Image (cartoon, rainbow, N blue to C red):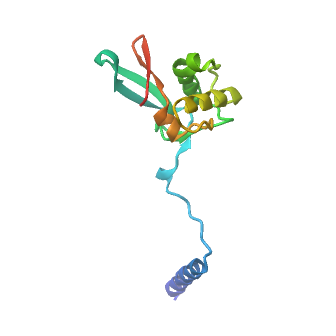
Amino acid sequence: MKHFRGSRTAAGAVAGLTLLSGLGIGVATAAPAAAYAGYCNDGYATVFRKLAGGNTYTAYLPGYKADMVCTMGSGAQSKSVAMLQRSLNVCYGKDLDFSLKVDGIFGPNTKKALAAAQRDEGIAGDGIYGKDSRTHLKWEFTHHTTTTCARI
């Protein structure tokens, strides 16, 4: 009898959710973990590209658990912020007239420099790091002691 009562309870819950759904009342569910773009933390993603002279150059991009799909903005503090600050300085600082302190703190100067680099690359200058910044901005790539800037 206990099994039957459990089945009735489950059927009642499904019927209730169906009724709520029919009335236009939604039920919130969590997104799958794989769909979450986390905040960039102390992880990083490594990118290899053949550039000048056919040499393989390496870039380190902000990451979330070693995945480059992540976001960050004002108030963030991590090694990922420091990676962004360094690339902004190397690839945009001279042309856009800024020099960020590479301290790993996403403060107002980092936001302003990122927004300027975003506008320079033709994307919305919102000062928030995410997919558009990752794919449109130039990054510092190194090969031994040689540094160049390129998109990923």
42 is higher (above) or lower (below) than 93: below
- The residue at the point 42 percent across, 18 percent down is 142
* Residue 5 x/y as whole percent: 54, 86
Q: Image height check: is 21 above or below 70?
A: below
Viewer can see residue 64: no
The quarter holding residue 56 reads top left
Q: Please report the residue visible at 54 percent of the width from the left and 39 percent of the height from the top.
A: 130
Q: Is residue 52 left or right of residue 92?
A: left
Residue at the far bottom in the pictured view:
1
Q: Is residue 143 positioned above or below 23 on the image?
A: above
x and y percent of residue 95 in the render? 56, 18
Q: Please say whether residue 47 is visible from this viewpoint.
A: yes
48 or 129: which is nearer to us? 129
- Residue at the left extreme of this rendering: 54
The number of discs equals 0
Q: Residue at x 60, y 76 (%)?
A: 24
Picture quadrant where residue 9 is located: bottom right
Residue 152, image x, y percentages: 41, 31
Q: Vertical placement of 28 versus 44: above or below?
A: below
